[in-house]
Each structure stands twice: as C-alpha cells, then as structure tokens.
Amino acid sequence: MLQCYFDDSGTHSDSTVITWGGLLGTAEQWEYLDQQWKALLANPMPGHPRLKQFHLSPCAARKGDFLAYKEAESDRLRFLFRQIIADAGLEAVSYSVPIKAYDELVRGRTRELLGSYPESLCVGACLKYSFEKAAEMGEKAITVTFDQGRMTPALLDWIERGTATYRGEVVPISIGGGSVAEMTGLQAADTIAIENWWFAKSVLEGSPTRSAHFKSLVGKTPVVGNIMTRESLKQVMKVAVAEIVI
C-alpha cells in the first residue's frame, strides 16, 4: 500500500503563491521515518529541550520553540530532519500556483470546475499524482492524508468529487485530514511544502533562488516540483476536468 502525506504553504492572506507538497512511500519507509523523526524530536540539539513537533518555518526564522537556537544550530537541525526524509527513501512532489494569475484567468464555468481558490488545483494534482504513482509501483491500495487545518468543506467536497471520477484499480483506503502536531508524516510534508513554496515564490517573482537547503533537499530526495505560470494555467483551462482531477 502506498501512503501519502501532504501539507500546504502560502495559504496566509497576503501570500502571492500557494503550494501543496508532500511525500509518498511504503509503510516500511514511513515506519522508518516515524521512528527516526521521533528520536530527533526527543533529542534535537545539545542543550535544547525536546520538541513536540518540527515545523520548518519557525526553525528557519528561529522563533517559537527555536528562539534559543543559534543560526548554525537551526541550519544543522534542518539538515538532520531532511536527512531522515532522504534515508527513508521517500519521493517528494509539490504543486505551486500564483494566486493573482489564477483569479484573473480562471473564471466562470472553468472556475466552477477547477475550484474557487487555487488550492483546489494543487490538492487535485497531488491526488492525481498519488494514484498514478501507486499504479506505477504496482500498489493495490492507497492512503492520502492532508493537513486537517486546511480541510474546509469546499476542499473536502473537491476531494470527494475528484476521487468519484477515478476508474483505476488502486483502492483508496482513506483520504482525509490529519493533525500535523501528531503525525510525523505531515511534519515531513511540511518541510517539502515550505522549501518548494520558497523556491516557487522566487521563480514566479522573476528571481529564481535555490538556497543551500533547497539544493540539499533536491540533491538527496527525488522531488517532482511543479510551478504553474500564467501560460501553463491557460493550458490547464483548455483541457477537460478529467485531466485535472483523478
């Protein structure tokens, strides 16, 4: 069975880009990550207390639980959590959409099909990729877990409509939301979503910036990163909705 976890980034009110990203792998790979992740949370860095969860953004900014961290310690901890993802052998995928372009281009009936907010497009793409990957790997079943904090009624309805059109052989055991604080898989997905959001934001703003951390991520973990431009959004509008959802 293929297990998939996805988290969001750029969903705050003043964001220009929205990203959903996450990781896909077998039960054995996720079991390894869970054990190693919890061990690192229990003993993150010498001189620092255990962490309840790892969230990349405050770690990078050295805020909240990471306020007492020096820059070198923050960088080291980010590396250690990324290394767990790499050692687990998981595959990463992300989808990023510029919000202004979506609002300007996706209107009328097309907007009804694709969703009132670009987040729907990202989530639908994550689902589609997950089912295709499971079929490619020969897996007979799949579970997909999203950050429950973003599971609005509209987004849940979008997921239900998307899975209803699926006619493949992979059986969806469960598709829904989970707690980031309680699930190491979603904490790992958070790292993928945020790293890809930072990069996508720089690309869409015209100044692509690959940080040392992002280079380290893509150098060790297979990452399928998808960044939609205005032109690619126009192409999406031309295809049937079956090409957008599962």
Image (tube, rainbow, N blue to C red):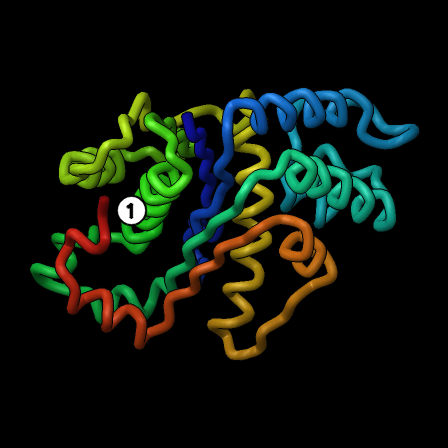
Q: Is residue 156 above or below residue 228?
A: above
Q: Position of residue 49 (x, y in %)?
A: 82, 23
What type is the residue that disc 1 sits on?
Gly
Query: Where residue 57 sits in the image (x, y, percent)?
Result: 63, 46
Task: Identify the residue at image location x=41%, y=55%.
Answer: 95
Residue 189: percent from left, percent from top: 53, 39
Counting from the top left corner in percent of width and height, residue 67 is at 78, 39
Front residue (pair 135, 51): 135
Quarter of the figure with the N terminus: top left
Q: Is residue 157 visible?
A: no
- Of the pair 41 and 141, the residue shown nearer to us: 141
Residue 214, placed above or below residue 135: below
Q: What is the total number of numbered labels drawn onto the structure image?
A: 1
Kindly identify which residue carries mark 1: 124
Q: Name the quarter where the C terminus is drawn.
A: top left
Residue drawn at 16 percent across, 69 percent down: 238
Left or right: residue 162 compared with residue 34: left
Q: Callout 1: helix, strand or loop? A: helix
Residue 219: which quarter of the image?
bottom right
The vertical placement of 240 against 132, above or below, is below
- In the picture, measured across the screen, residue 165 lies left or right of residue 245, that is left
